[in-house]
């Protein structure tokens, strides 16, 4: 049955929501997550607290519009998934990229340039959101930048 005939509601996020109402600092977020992964991998537990604060301060939500709240749900889920990937793969991290900001910019651009539509099938198949494949390639490149082998980065980013 086509998705538009099933019960539920569809929310389409306009691109402007990424930049204006939510005021999320993706670059700061991904930089903080990267630093947290490095701190965890090198056993610098004191730095993890600061990295967590940096990551949390990079996210802001200033709206109660359904479209923007739905986007925040997806964004926070992606953020948590990336943080979990970095945390779970900390033993694979070999290098700290010299230009971590370039890697963070690439993830940032992937999120900001993606249109997002949530339909009633979202809860059954969240992996089918257009933003998921859009972030897999830069995430893979980001992991490789930390010295994780290509095949391992491929598995982690999928």
Image (cartoon, rainbow, N blue to C red):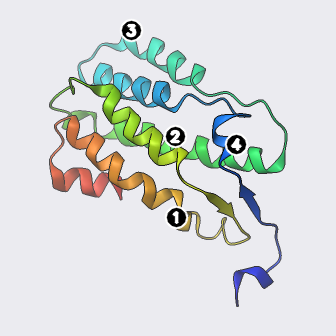
Mark 1 against mark 4, which lies toward the viewer?
4
Please tell me which of labels 4 and 2 falls first in the chain: 4
**Residue at label 3?**
46
Please tell me which of labels 1 and 4 falls first in the chain: 4
Please tell me which of labels 4 and 3 falls first in the chain: 4
Quarter the N terminus occupies: bottom right
Label 2–label 3 contact, CB within 8 A:
no
Quarter residue 32 falls in: top left
* Residue 93 placement, left or right of 13: left
What's the residue at 21%, 43% (across, down)?
Answer: 144
Quarter the C terminus occupies: bottom left
Please tell me which of labels 2 and 3 falls first in the chain: 3
* Residue 12 placement, left or right of 8: left
Please tell me which of labels 3 and 1 falls first in the chain: 3
> Does residue 18 sit above or below 10 in this rendering?
above
**Residue at label 1?**
127
What's the residue at 54%, 68% (across, down)?
Answer: 128
What's the residue at 82%, 70% (across, down)?
Answer: 8
**Residue at label 4?**
17
**Residue at label 2?**
80
Please tell me which of labels 1 and 2 falls first in the chain: 2
What element does badge 3 sit on? helix
What element does badge 1 sit on? helix
């Amino acid at each position: 049955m086509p998705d538009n005939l099933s019960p539920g509601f569809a929310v389409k996020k306009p691109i402007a929501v990424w930049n204006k109402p939510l005021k999320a600092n993706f670059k700061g977020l991904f930089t903080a997550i990267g630093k947290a992964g490095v701190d965890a991998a090198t056993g610098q537990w004191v730095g993890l607290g600061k990295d967590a604060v940096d990551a949390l301060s990079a996210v802001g939500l200033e709206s109660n519009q359904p479209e923007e709240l739905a986007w925040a749900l997806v964004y926070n889920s992606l953020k948590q998934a990336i943080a979990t990937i970095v945390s779970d793969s900390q033993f694979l991290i070999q290098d700290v990229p010299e230009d971590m900001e370039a890697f963070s910019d690439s993830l940032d651009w992937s999120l900001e340039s993606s249109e997002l539509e949530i339909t009633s099938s979202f809860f059954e198949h969240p992996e089918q959101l257009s933003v998921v494949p859009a972030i897999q390639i830069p995430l893979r490149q980001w992991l490789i930048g930390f010295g994780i082998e290509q095949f391992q980065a491929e598995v982690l980013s999928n």
